[in-house]
Image: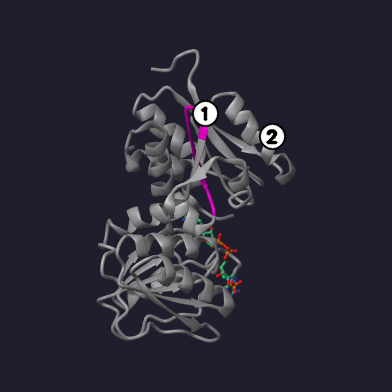
């Protein structure tokens, strides 16, 4: 039931025009009869402080921060939960009694999606990439009990930082691989995650091969569109179980809704809204 004074949530990012999260979130609000709205706002970096103050003044119950605001927002809010503090970036803020608490739901979304095919606990993970998405995924995998994370990245210094973050703050062990040619999984790997931006249309191939015996591997991509990337198709052809980045995108939005409203939303309703919003995931 929608009232004349709904609770407000939304997103601050720029550019914001291609952000499909609002379609998923509003579909979930409608499906569950929640008296909440979601407003997708294009906010320039120099206006982020005004936007956050506005959300506080208007009594919003929460908001997402997407690129380029995920780090800058930290100085504008009142505290961070443990994983956001470790990751050093916030994509979801929850307002409770005027206090703003920052979360990072990117990695939690990945975990929720991974759990549909495998338990993260005890896994030996090869993580491709060391940017923001990789950092969030590494921290959440470690907090969920992964046994070991190998971080492979083109820029080795960034891989070292992510591996140290895991080893210094969690019980998960880690190491680093310099990624300067075609890579195959180290012995003992059980899960591979492409957390680079490679695989986006026009961005080039992911220089990785699962190897001849991939039947025991779970191979995941963070690229949500196209959902069935070339990276995943090659892994599946070699016998691996594959997981699309689309699930991570849906699940992180579902975690946001749960944080703001206390309702665990129906992912299939959100997935249908996502597909409709972006025209069946076809690229022009
Ligand atoms: P960053 O820019 O922080 O990191 C990009 C990563 O990709 C780095 O590790 C970078 O390596 C690597 N990379 C980029 N180009 C190349 C290349 N030519 N060769 C080798 N490595 C390369 O981006 P994010 O971490 O924020 O995002 C990564 C991807 O994750 C994006 O595609 C984004 O859309 C996706 N994503 C998906 C989400 C979902 O819900 N499904 C949520 C968040 C992100 P280097 O350090 O050497 O530059």
Q: Position of residue 151 (x, y in %)?
A: 46, 75
Q: Residue 9: image x %, image y %?
A: 51, 31
Q: Residue 111 location, x and y as percent?
A: 35, 57
Residue at 56% from the left image edge and 39% from the top image edge: 11
**Magenta span:** 89-99
Checking the image for residue 15, the label placed there is none
Comparing marks 2 and 1, which lies closer to the viewer? 1
Q: Whereabouts is ligand 1, in terms of quadrant?
A: bottom right
Looking at the image, which is closer to me, 181 or 6?
6
Give the number of the disc on residue 98.
1
Q: How is colour applied across the structure in the image?
A: one colour
Separation of residues labelled 2 and 1 (CA atoms):
16 Å
User: SS for tag 2?
Assistant: helix
Assign the C terminus to one quadrant of the image: bottom right
The response on whether ligand 1 sits within 8 Å of label 1 is no
Which residue occupies 25% across, 62% down? 119
Of 17 and 6, which appears nearest the observer?
A: 6
On the picture, is 201 further left or further right than 248? right
Is residue 129 one of those drawn in magenta?
no
Q: Residue sitting at 60 percent across and 68 percent down? A: 203
Crowding near pointer 1: few (<14 within 10 Å), some, many (20+)? some
Question: Mark 2 vs mark 1: which is more N-terminal?
Answer: 2
On the image, the x and y values in percent for residue 259 come to 40, 38
Label 2 Cα neighbours within 10 Å, binned few <14 / some 14-19 / many ≥20: few
């Amino acid at each position: 039931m929608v009232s004349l004074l709904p609770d407000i949530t939304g997103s601050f990012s720029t550019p914001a025009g291609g952000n499909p999260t609002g379609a998923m979130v509003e579909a979930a609000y409608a499906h569950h009869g929640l008296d909440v709205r979601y407003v997708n706002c294009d906010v320039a970096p120099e206006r982020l402080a005004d936007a956050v103050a506005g959300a506080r003044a208007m009594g919003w119950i929460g908001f997402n921060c997407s690129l380029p605001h995920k780090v800058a927002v930290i100085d504008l809010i009142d505290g961070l939960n443990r994983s956001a503090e470790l990751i050093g970036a916030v994509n979801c803020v929850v307002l409770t009694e005027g206090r703003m608490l920052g979360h990072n739901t990117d990695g939690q979304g990945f975990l929720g999606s991974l759990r549909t095919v495998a338990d993260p606990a005890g896994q030996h993970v090869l993580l491709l990439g060391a940017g923001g998405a990789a950092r969030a995924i590494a921290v959440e995998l470690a907090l969920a009990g992964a046994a070991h994370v190998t971080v492979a990245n083109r820029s080795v210094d960034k891989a070292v930082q992510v591996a140290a973050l895991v080893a210094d703050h969690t019980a998960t062990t880690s190491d680093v691989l310099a990624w300067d040619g075609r890579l195959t999984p180290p012995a003992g790997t059980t899960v591979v995650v492409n957390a680079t931006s490679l695989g986006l249309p026009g961005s080039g191939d992911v220089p990785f091969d699962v190897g001849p015996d991939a039947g025991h591997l779970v191979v995941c991509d963070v690229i949500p569109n196209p959902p069935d990337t070339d990276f995943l198709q090659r892994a599946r052809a070699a016998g691996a179980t594959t997981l699309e980045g689309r699930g991570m995108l849906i699940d992180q939005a579902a975690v946001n809704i749960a944080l703001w409203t206390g309702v665990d939303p129906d992912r299939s309703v959100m997935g249908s809204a996502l597909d409709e919003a972006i025209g069946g995931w076809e690229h022009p």
